[in-house]
Image (tube, helix red, strand yellow):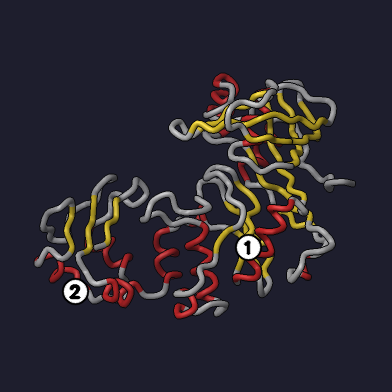
Amino acid sequence: MKEIVITEREAGQRLDKYLQKCMPQAPKSFFYKMLRKKNITWNGKRAEGKEKLKSGDTIRFFLAQETIEKFSGEQKEQVSALLPEKYKPQIVYEDDQAVIFNKPAGLLSQKARPQDVSLVEYLTAHLLENGSITREELKGFHPAVCNRLDRNTSGLVLAGKTVAGLQQLSEMLKNRTMEKYYLTLVSGVIKKPQKISGYLVKDPRANQVRVSAVPLGEGSPIETAYEPLGDNGRATLLRVELITGRSHQIRSHLASIGHPVAGDTKYGDPAANSYYRKRYGLNFQLLHAWQICFPEDCGILTQLAERRIEASLPPLFGRILAGEGLARPVKEPGK
């Protein structure tokens, strides 16, 4: 049995149209037959197919897994049907072992729920489409992302196309041999570069973290470095180096020193957030994974050795910088 819970993004369409997107290889008559026999149910009831879907509706498929796979067809068709244009990532680098995406804000790096479409599904669809992997190969290996960005953080995400590529990227991330730089706009004026440290404690129930200057319980040590690239007297554009990669590290660490990220509803300044929302329509943290600098030794990823990969700024980020009188960054890390 397979279950799908309808999201806000999917709501508003007819049930039969939605089923056709889920299983594009099945004839229309198949759906109506399955609905009549209650092999496909809508909110636990028999349906005709003309029902309009609402957020929270539940669709259950009492079908053999082989039938679902047979009629699902190419995953690229499902992804293109379910992923709006504004959430489609840009490929900024690709070789035989790895892919690097510029992920837009709003797209999950990995599924949070079974029915979600995330960057991982897009990656798999892309590799099926260009012939890098076959469906038979997917039974033994699933391409995956190596570094996860929060849903509303944009920028560079590394992904492995092969087991070896995935292992190599994961090893470099674990050993911190690559340099990762972010761009963000924070409240207040910062004039000098600085490296800060502390301890991060997770609160899983609230999906938040807090930062302490001293060890607390199961707190993890964190290090963050930043350099100001310009300010307008109210806010500062920062280039941030993520030295340790903890959940919400940049957002919580900067907030803990009095310089919260613009638009951040978890750790930010409500007054500043209101200003950016009203003036620019910003309703999420303005944080962008901008550049990754690879080391000389990249193992099997020889084409990435000593390369600097950059993700272009999202249009909204650029508009906010222009509106606030701040220049787009051009400085390269370490230079």
Task: Please give the residue where the numbered disc 1 appears in the rendered image.
Answer: 91
- Would you say 286 lies left or right of 17 here? right
Query: Residue 69: x and y, percent?
Result: 33, 74
Q: Nearer the viewer, residue 249 or 183?
A: 249
Task: Please give the residue where the numbered disc 2 appears in the rendered image.
Answer: 30
Query: Residue 269: x and y, percent?
Result: 59, 22
Q: Nearer the viewer, residue 235 or 149?
A: 149
Query: Residue 330: x and y, percent?
Result: 82, 46
Whether residue 309 appears in this view of the structure is yes
Badge 1 amino acid: Ile
Which quadrant of the view contains residue 296? bottom right
Badge 2 amino acid: Phe
Q: Quadrant of the N terminus?
A: bottom left
Assign a secondary structure to mark 2.
Answer: helix
Q: Residues within 10 Å of mark 2 (few under 14, many from 20)?
A: few
Q: Residues within 10 Å of mark 1 (few under 14, many from 20)?
A: some
Residue at point 57% right, 19% down? 271
Task: Classify 181 as above or below 98.
Answer: above
- Would you say 135 lies left or right of 44 here? right
